[in-house]
Amino acid sequence: MATRSMRSTRRAEAALDRARQRDLMLGGGRGPRIAAVSALTVLAVLWLAPMVWALVTSFKTEGDAVALPPTLVPGTGFTLEQYRNLFEAGNVQMWLFNSLVIAVLVTLLTIVVAAPAAFAMSRMDFRGRAALMALTVAAIVVPPQLLIVPLFQQMVSLGLVDTYAAVILPQLVAPVIVFVLKRFFDAVPRELDEAARMDGASYWRLFTTVIMPLSRPVLAAASIFVFITAWNNYLWPFIITTDPALMTLPVGIPNILDSYGTFYASQLAASMVAAAPMVVVFMLFQRQIVNSVATTGLGGQ
């Protein structure tokens, strides 16, 4: 009962703090609040209008898509022709499966690698820890495109070209995730470590039974961003795979479109298919994504 009461109190305090911050940002009065809401509404409409137009155009024929003057509702009515052609022209189902498998494995393995590394740099004293942390921070600012050639040469020397391993392994290097997790682990009170050590807990037990349960919010946020990044990754899968059976959705769909020229309705239908899983992920984890942008600093990644 006491624990439940404390949780309720903390939630109420957090809600009150958010309300105060919102009032402070909006100026604390009715006039500024109305102005802010109006401005945000206009921005939302401007942001949504192209997406709505793209969605509607994907259900048009190619003739209606390029007709002048453009109309929101086509004269011949809406059709699923573009989606049927898309799924008939290529192995879209297989590419969806490949994207899902690769994104899930990259997410799980990245967290498995990054979390212990962040814990070691946060809680363990060893020689070279400061230099290792400095290298981790320096790696964040290195453009991934600079590593394409050496990574490709390494995959060729290992004989991993056109394999799932070649697509997945280079994406497991995520210094920004290590840095964010370390920052969160640093904020966990050291008194918990001392209490666990007094009970005879090893570093591994401290990590698995104390730190990890307290880190679920930041782990969820990091997992979501890694999943989205892996799903949208185009350059590396495009370079390392030539077998159509191993292509991901972002790589496979442009190959279909390039084969048949430029057709606006078909391109927008393909864009909708590629974006649909990410829309579902955002709808399911909207609260975690918004909170992670505010608390972990991952919004610019």
Image (tube, helix red, strand yellow):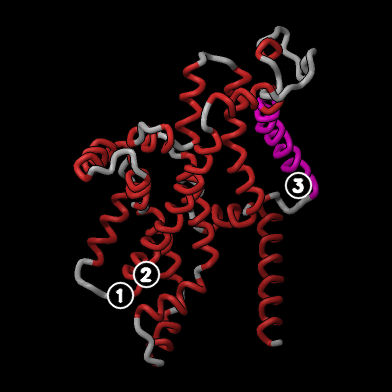
Upstream in sequence: badge 3 or badge 1: 3
Q: Amino acid at mark 3?
A: Arg
**Pointer 2: residues within 10 angstroms few (<14), some, or many (20+)?**
many
Q: Which residue is mark 2?
A: 119
Question: Is 270 drawn above or below residue 236 in the view shown?
Answer: above
Residue 80 seen by the camera:
yes
On the image, the x and y values in percent for residue 173 come to: 34, 52
Upstream in sequence: badge 3 or badge 2: 3
**Do labels 2 and 1 touch, CB within 8 Å?**
yes
Q: Residue at x 68, y 71 (%)?
A: 11
Q: CA distance from mark 3 to mark 1?
A: 48 Å
Say which of 250 and 83 sits in front: 83
Q: Which residue is mark 3?
A: 33
Say which of 184 and 156 sits in front: 156
Q: Magenta segment: does it hold 35?
A: yes
For residue 256, which numbered disc appears in the image? none
Q: Residue at x 30, y 75 (%)?
A: 124
Numbered label tally:
3
Q: Which residue is mark 1?
A: 124
Q: Which portion, as a residue range, is magenta? A: 30-54
Q: Residue at x 23, y 73 (%)?
A: 126
Circle 2: element type: helix
Say which of 241 and 1 sits in front: 241
Occupied quadrant, residue 116? bottom left
Question: Is 85 drawn above or below residue 159 in the view shown?
Answer: above
